[in-house]
Image (cartoon, grey):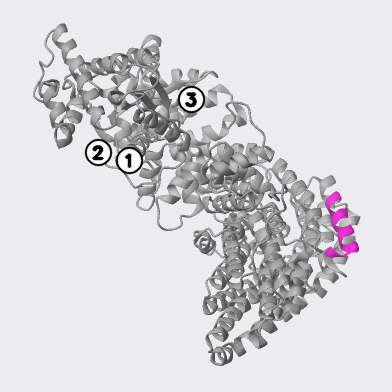
């Protein structure tokens, strides 16, 4: 029985805390009574955790009752939570005899305000309640849950003190009348210095049977998991990250913000604001005034600045600040500032200001900051306060100063924000009072804002801003500036894969500037035109202009443009970036860009060096290049720009291909919060390959999310592969082919070249078709199914052959593309005449360049082909090798397919030799965590794998050790020396 409504909302990120509570409950069931005081801020998840613990206790046979303390001010009802709990117990027929033997229940249930009488009467009442609980615990283990202890009346606090100090003696062995646990929660943010609960808590935590457990805010990744779990549909990363940032680890705030995310824009949801303001309204009027003044400053405010802005006498201000700090609404920091305990409290207070009050306070802060002489460090603050107080000339000047400061700090996102604010203010400020100087015209500022947007990863915003700059170009605009606008627009269009338009604008830019005399503007216009020409297959144009521009760049000493041109020529000339000559050009370009201090071009050079290594099949060589590029971008503040994002994508793709899946997931998880939205989601998308291969049911939904919003070539590519593969694995041949066609059409875009990924997509579709035809052959309907798929399959294999002949650069495909072609041919042979062992032997060998997972998938199909011609021993060996790879990677679906083949084909399984247990490195990691008592879910969280994958590893370990249980497996591992004993307290 329980009075608690056990919620079905997910409990996330509280495994350790739940383990402590369940430990107390388990000991109480054995007769060792105990109590836990659960502390935490409002909304942090105390009730949800108590619900989970109570639900588990009820499931284990305990009687669970809950008593709620209620905020009734100074006239609280005595013993309210105990009255509620005893009322619930009295309604249970099992306890009728015990309740009758103890009049305490009747006295409390009908007592009223005078319950307890004098001291002797109160003592007898308390002793009778303790005896009653002991009697109830003899009938069934008993859990008492007291919620919101910070609102408890004095009588309830006294009774709780008595029960914990007298009724829960700490003694070993236990007894049936000690099968009692008490869980009591309270809000730490409500405990001001003089709160009556404080001395009681200090007394109780010293008792041996009482523990204190503080529930801290959830880490950001756990809040993100919670937010996604609360929605049935995939949420955009930008929405999730915004909620996570504002919730600051508070589960309730996260849920409220999520609920309002579709209905409100900005601000605090009204229901949540009302809740937050209740605590503010408990302060004196002066303290509320100080809090409002602080809210206008922002989340944090310097002590001296707040004193000046508040304009209060010193003593009044000190008292008000002490009150706000005492009620834990403000926190006094060591650096001489005050900060709101939670950002949402500050938002609610700020939103509650009257318009005139808000404008007046912003004006005061602007004047104080200007008088303070804080320089560029305070420019952003001055711009904000000036704008909000409607001093637009001062706001414009401060915005430009703040933008300059952000550029010096390599902070493009902040620079963009300040420049866009300046552009927004520009028409509202008379020309006579605008800042003057070089580059301080609207077109140049817009062009500069577009560059900041591109560096910040806001690629479509960069295009929009450059188009705005182009619209502002008039007949009186300087010719070089007009050309620069056009080639900048062309460069930005390349980043969003609008290739034909990019070529058109780069052509216009080049035509506007005379080649003679040589100029830097012409060189950069030519470099952009070469890059655009290369993308649409105009290789002759790219070579002709590129070679000429390179000579001019060398003459003028424009090393950044020289490096950029070398990169384009390295890709187009001769054997391309895979050839020794191409790689030498790229290394030279990298060095030129480095000496020129042009990090953007340097990262482009490193990307092409790395992808050239990948295309050559040298996967390991490219990882240091990728690390160098990402580090260079980090130092320059360019991690969100286009080539660093592609470097991140390539890094994760290589880790996936090399089978370093856990590292791939870890790096993706670490990088995800810093990705620009929406254009950066593709950078971590290779992690979806891992998710799909490990049987993550949400992988397909997350892949579809990549197709939302503005078109992104890389996101479309990954989504196409994941969704085509998912359909093929589900046996949906029609769906796989439809997805493949849509993907190839989208990726073709306005370029004349067919994307090289077609060979992979075609092979995946052919696999689905081959499975369909093979299944029909088993059922005797092969002729009809073969006829139906003959023409589509022939088209698919031709597409694979054509795509494998040349990649996006017009060059022959490297080892990866050739391997997918070999697989496509093997699938085609299966469709036409049945599985061919020789074809699958070639496919297994082709993926030996480094893609162990795809090689294992080919081994499975090779084993099927061998089994079909009764070469059973060879089939068993291929199945064994495939299973070993699948188990090591945690590829649960592949592992299940291999095991199904082994069972169906009666291939058996070779037992490990005596004394030799071939555990993989991942299995050893799992085994060590098993020895620490971790669950599958906990193992998954620690190793960045799913619980299902952890379960696969555990099953493999049990099989290899010949153990029937997890406990036996750990014991066997210790005996064989596979794991060593760890010091006490480890883990």
User: Residue 952 in the image: x percent, y percent?
Assistant: 57, 54
Is residue 414 left or right of 192 when viewed as pictured?
right
* Quarter of the image where the C terminus is located: top right
Disc 3/disc 1 C-alpha distance (Å): 45 Å
Disc 2/disc 3 C-alpha distance (Å): 48 Å
Secondary structure mostly taken by the magenta-highlighted segment of the chain: helix
Disc 2/disc 1 C-alpha distance (Å): 8 Å
Magenta segment: does it hold 331? no
Report which residue position mark 2 lands on.
2
Report which residue position mark 1 lands on.
55
Dot 1 alpha-carbon crowd within 10 angstroms: few under 14, some 14 to 19, many 20 or more: some
Depicted 413 relative to depicted 771: above or below: above
Residue 976, quarter of picture: top right
Is residue 819 left or right of 246 when viewed as pictured?
right
Depicted 546 relative to depicted 413: above or below: below
Q: Earlier in the sequence, mark 2 or mark 3?
A: 2
Residue range (magenta): 578-591
Q: Are marks 2 and 1 in contact (CB under 8 Å)?
A: yes
**Residue placed at 23% from the left, 31% from the top?**
139
User: Residue 22 in the image: x percent, y percent?
Assistant: 40, 33
């Amino acid at each position: 029985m329980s009075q608690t409504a056990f919620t079905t909302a997910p409990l996330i990120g509280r495994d350790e805390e739940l383990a402590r509570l369940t430990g107390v409950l388990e000991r109480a069931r054995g007769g060792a009574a105990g109590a836990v005081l659960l502390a935490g801020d409002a909304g942090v998840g105390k009730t949800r955790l108590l619900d989970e613990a109570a639900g588990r206790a009820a499931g284990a046979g305990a009687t669970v009752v809950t008593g709620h303390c209620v905020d009734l001010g100074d006239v609280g009802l005595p013993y309210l939570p105990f009255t509620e709990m005893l009322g619930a117990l009295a309604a249970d027929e099992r306890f009728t005899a015990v309740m009758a033997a103890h009049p305490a229940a009747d006295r409390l249930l009908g007592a009223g305000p005078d319950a307890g009488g004098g001291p002797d009467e109160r003592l007898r009442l308390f002793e009778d309640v303790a005896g009653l609980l002991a009697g109830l615990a003899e009938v069934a283990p008993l859990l008492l849950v007291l919620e919101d202890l910070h609102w408890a009346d004095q009588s309830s606090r006294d009774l709780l003190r008595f029960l914990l100090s007298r009724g829960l003696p700490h003694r070993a062995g236990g007894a049936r009348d000690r099968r009692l646990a008490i869980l009591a929660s309270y809000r730490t943010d409500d405990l001001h210095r003089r709160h009556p609960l404080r001395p009681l808590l200090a007394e109780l935590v010293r008792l041996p049977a009482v523990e204190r457990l503080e529930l801290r805010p959830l880490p950001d990744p756990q809040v993100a998991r919670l937010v996604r779990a609360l929605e049935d549909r995939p949420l955009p990363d930008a929405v999730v990250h915004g909620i996570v940032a504002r919730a600051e680890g508070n589960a309730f705030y996260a849920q409220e913000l999520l609920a309002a995310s579709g209905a409100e824009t900005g601000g605090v949801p009204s229901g949540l604001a009302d809740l937050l303001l209740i605590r503010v309204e408990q302060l004196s009027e002066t303290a509320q005034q100080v809090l409002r003044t602080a809210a206008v400053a922002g989340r944090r405010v310097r002590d001296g600045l707040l004193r000046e802005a508040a304009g209060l006498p010193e003593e009044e201000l000190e008292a008000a600040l002490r009150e706000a700090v005492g009620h834990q609404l403000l926190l006094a920091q060591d650096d001489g500032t005050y900060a709101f305990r939670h950002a949402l409290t500050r938002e609610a207070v700020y939103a509650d200001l009257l318009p005139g009050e808000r404008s007046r306070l912003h004006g005061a802060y602007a004047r104080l900051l200007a008088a303070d002489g804080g320089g560029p460090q305070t420019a952003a603050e001055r711009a904000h306060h000036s704008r909000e107080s409607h001093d637009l000339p001062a706001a414009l000047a401060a915005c430009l100063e703040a933008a300059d400061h952000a550029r010096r700090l390599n902070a493009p996102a902040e620079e963009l924000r300040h420049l866009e604010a300046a552009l927004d203010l520009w028409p509202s400020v008379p020309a006579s009072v605008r800042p003057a100087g070089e580059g301080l015209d609207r077109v140049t500022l817009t062009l500069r804002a577009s560059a900041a947007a591109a560096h910040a990863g806001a690629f479509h915003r960069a295009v929009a801003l450059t188009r705005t700059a182009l619209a502002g170009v008039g007949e009186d605009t300087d010719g070089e500036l007009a050309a620069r606008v056009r080639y900048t627009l062309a460069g930005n269009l390349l980043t969003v894969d609008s290739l034909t338009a990019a070529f058109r604008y780069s052509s216009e830019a080049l035509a506007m500037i005379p080649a003679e005399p040589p100029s830097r503007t012409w060189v950069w216009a030519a470099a952009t035109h070469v890059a655009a020409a290369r993308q649409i297959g105009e290789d002759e144009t790219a070579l002709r202009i590129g070679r000429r521009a390179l000579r001019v760049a060398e003459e003028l000493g424009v090393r950044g443009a020289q490096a950029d041109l070398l990169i384009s020529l390295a890709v187009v000339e001769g054997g391309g970036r895979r050839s020794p000559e191409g790689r030498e050009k790229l290394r030279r370009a990298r060095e030129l860009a480095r000496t020129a201090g042009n990090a953007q071009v340097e990262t482009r050079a490193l990307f092409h060096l790395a992808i050239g290594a990948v295309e050559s099949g040298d996967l390991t060589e490219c990882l240091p290049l990728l690390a160098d590029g990402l580090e260079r971008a980090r130092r320059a503040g360019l991690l969100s720009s286009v080539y660093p994002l592609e470097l991140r994508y390539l890094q994760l793709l290589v880790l996936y291909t090399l089978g370093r899946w856990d590292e791939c997931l870890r790096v993706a998880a670490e990088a995800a919060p810093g990705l620009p939205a929406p254009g950066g989601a593709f950078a971590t998308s290779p992690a979806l390959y891992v998710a799909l291969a490990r049987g993550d049911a949400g992988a397909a939904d997350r892949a579809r999310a990549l197709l939302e919003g503005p078109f992104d070539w890389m996101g479309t590519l990954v989504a196409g592969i994941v969704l085509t593969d998912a359909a093929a694995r589900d046996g949906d041949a029609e769906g796989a082919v439809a997805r493949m066609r849509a993907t190839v059409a989208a990726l073709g875009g306005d370029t004349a070249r067919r994307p090289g990924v077609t060979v992979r997509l075609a092979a995946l579709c052919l696999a689905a078709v081959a499975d369909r035809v093979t299944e029909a052959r088993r059922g005797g309907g092969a002729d009809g199914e073969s006829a139906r798929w003959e023409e589509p399959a022939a088209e698919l294999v031709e597409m694979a052959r054509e795509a494998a002949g040349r990649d996006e650069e017009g060059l022959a495909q490297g080892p990866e593309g050739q391997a997918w072609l070999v697989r496509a041919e093997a699938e085609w042979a299966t469709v036409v005449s049945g599985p061919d062992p020789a074809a699958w032997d070639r496919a297994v060998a082709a993926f030996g360049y480094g893609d162990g997972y795809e090689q294992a998938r080919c081994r499975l199909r090779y084993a099927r082909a061998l089994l079909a011609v009764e070469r059973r021993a060879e089939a068993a060996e291929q199945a064994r090798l495939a299973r070993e790879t699948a188990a090591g990677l945690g590829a649960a679906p592949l592992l299940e397919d291999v095991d199904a083949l082994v069972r169906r084909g009666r291939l058996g399984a070779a037992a490990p030799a005596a004394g030799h247990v071939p555990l993989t490195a991942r299995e050893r990691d799992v085994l060590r965590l098993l020895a620490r008592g971790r669950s599958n879910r906990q193992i998954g969280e620690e190793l960045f794998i799913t619980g299902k994958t952890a379960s696969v590893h555990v099953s493999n370990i049990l099989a290899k050790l010949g153990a029937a249980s997890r406990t036996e497996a750990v014991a066997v591992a210790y005996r064989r020396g596979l794991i060593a004993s760890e010091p006490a307290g480890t883990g």
